[in-house]
Amino acid sequence: MILVAGSANIDFVVRVPHIVTPGETLLGSDYALFAGGKGANQAVAAARCGAPTAFLGAVGADPFAAQLRASLEQAGVDLSRLRTVPRPTGAAFISVSDAGENAITVAPGANAAVTAEGVDLEGVSWLLLQLEIPLETVVALAAQARRRGVRVMLNAAPARDLPEHLLSDLEVLLVNAGELRQLAGGDDAPLEDLAARLQARGPRALVVTLGGEGVYARVDQQNLYIGAFAVGVLDTTGAGDTFAGALASRLAAGEDWAPALRFAAAAAALACTRAGAQASMPTLEETQAFLRARAD
């Protein structure tokens, strides 16, 4: 089973002609509410891709929490580790441009109350983490999992500096190009040099998403490149989380790295063709059909 520990947010989404600049007021569409949060998103993605999945997180005692629970339950996610706390459910305020790009502001709310205390890792083979919950919780969960023989994947987003002992507990570190540069020192070295430098600090595998250029991975000191799938982009919100959950689902199933990365890239591409975060995430069957069509 995959245990995803992370944030659960209600997403307020508005479409705009372009992403707002400092000092600018911009009129957009009517807003829409979607279930989101990087942790909940990745749990939904993993479950829809066929993996038994549980979610560890926190929500408030408000109507937004009910919408989040319903979305997770509909995807088949085990919610026995989801707590209700006396804080507002987390929220994200998302602008999506006509070009499909997005800008996101997160109000953590209940997510700040997620802790590692008393976490049950029985039956868990992979732990998937992100950085929208307290860093001390992420560090403690990774250490507990490593001691129990559970493999840990960290999606290091939003970007921030990470302690060395956390990096050493990771099986997989998943970043985008900007996060890679920040974590590896911020200079203009080539991608492969930055990846080698960061992997040397602990993670057994490093995966870098490159948007329209595809995916790069460094596994056992070998370099892998997976090209992007060309699709009509409607909304990129949740695409990165789709990739993370889909990749975890394939690795947990014992799939080799190259097909696992290709599957995750296909799932993320499909998510870009639909609106919302969790609402956009494809099923195992949809992703497999997409891959079969692209193989013809």
Image (cartoon, rainbow, N blue to C red):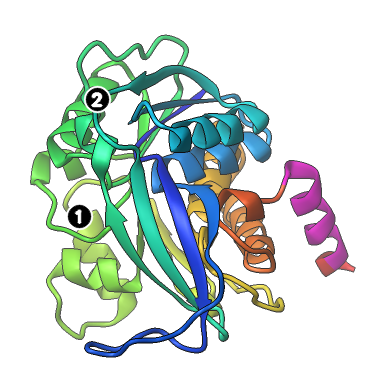
Which residue is rendered at x = 24% and y = 10% of the image? 118
- Report the side of 78 relative to 231 (left or right): left
Answer whether residue 292 is magenta in the image: yes
Q: Quadrant of residue 57?
A: top left
The span picked out in magenta is 283-293
Q: Which residue is mark 1?
A: 200
Image coordinates of residue 110 in percent, x first then y, are: 27, 34
Image coordinates of residue 265 in percent, x first then y, are: 60, 61
Q: Amino acid at mark 2?
A: Pro
Could you say which is closer to the camera, residue 107 or residue 154?
107
Could you say which is closer to the camera, residue 295 or residue 111?
111
Q: Quadrant of residue 46?
A: top right
Could you say which is closer to the camera, residue 107 or residue 224?
107
Instruction: Count numbered badges in the picture.
Output: 2
Q: Residues within 10 Å of mark 1 (few under 14, many from 20)?
A: few
- Report the side of 67 relative to 138 (left or right): right
Residue 35 seen in the current view: yes
User: Looking at the magenta stretch, what is its main secondary structure?
Assistant: helix
Checking the image for residue 86, the label placed there is 2
Which residue is rendered at x = 44% and y = 18% of the image? 124
Q: Residues within 10 Å of mark 2 (few under 14, many from 20)?
A: few
